[in-house]
Image (cartoon, rainbow, N blue to C red):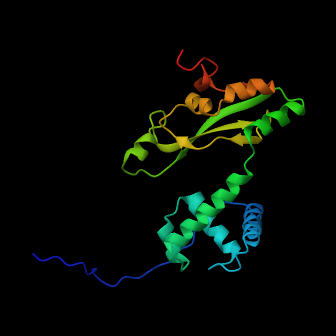
Amino acid sequence: MPTTKTPAGDLTELVYQCRLPLSTQTLTFLTGLLSAHLKKIRSRWRKLATGRITVIVLAALRHDQRLADLAGGNSVSRTTVGRWLKEMIELLAARAPRLERVLAKIAREGGSVVLLDGSLIPTQRQTGLPMRRRWSAKHKRHGLLVIALTDVHGRLLWTSTARPARGSEITACRHDDLVDRLREAGLAAIADLGFVGLDDEAGA
């Protein structure tokens, strides 16, 4: 029986809306950040306004929306959306507080303790070795592991680089020499039982 690639029936492209549970303050901040960057690099023109670009990037980050779908719904190419996403991530990463500065500030202000925890950021399941590294036996799903420090009131101070979830929270902390840096700053950390053994010598 011959096969055909002709679709059965007419194809209709539909554009739908979804709600982003983000504050106006977040949108305004990121739009301002992007606008300042474009002014700095003297980029006079973009396919869409900076506010619209910000919304598209937030949709990709918040809902893990496919870039091709976002591109089609906004009459731009997938490559363009991918470039916007990478650009915004780099702008945010450049503003991320450095661990040494965060700990030094806490110590200067008279603090003695920080709260330490790990969090899994779920990712879509795909094939290949990189995705196998993202499998978390603890959570039974694919994701990236992030270590976070907060003050005693729960205010976020610092987050680590996102790493494959196959590794443990202790291993992730050791990548950043977290124990040594806490000691240098004269600070202690409170964490759950998942971090028991963190201050032991690696390989001991």
Residue 188 visible to an observer of this rendering: no
* Quarter holding residue 114: top right
* 19 relative to 95 in the view: left or right: left
Tell me if residue 5 comes above or below residue 124 in the rendering. below
Q: Along the line of sight, which residue is nearer the eye, 160 or 140?
A: 160
Residue lying furthest top in this view?
204
Q: Residue at x 76, y 38 (%)?
A: 154
Q: Residue at x 36, y 50 (%)?
A: 127
Q: Along the line of sight, which residue is nearer the eye, 47 or 25?
A: 47
Position of the C terminus by quadrant: top right
* 183 relative to 73 in the view: left or right: right
Q: Residue at x 73, y 74 (%)?
A: 42
Q: Residue 180: x and y, percent? A: 70, 25
Tell me if residue 131 comes above or below residue 107 in the rendering. below
Q: Residue at x 82, y 34 (%)?
A: 104
Residue lying furthest left in this view?
1
Q: Residue 53: x and y, percent? A: 64, 71
Residue lying furthest right in this view?
109
Residue lying furthest bottom in this view?
10
* 50 relative to 5 in the view: left or right: right
Q: Residue 144: x and y, percent? A: 53, 44
Position of the N terminus by quadrant: bottom left
Q: Residue 195: x and y, percent? A: 61, 25
Number of residue marks: 0
Residue 147 visible to an observer of this rendering: yes
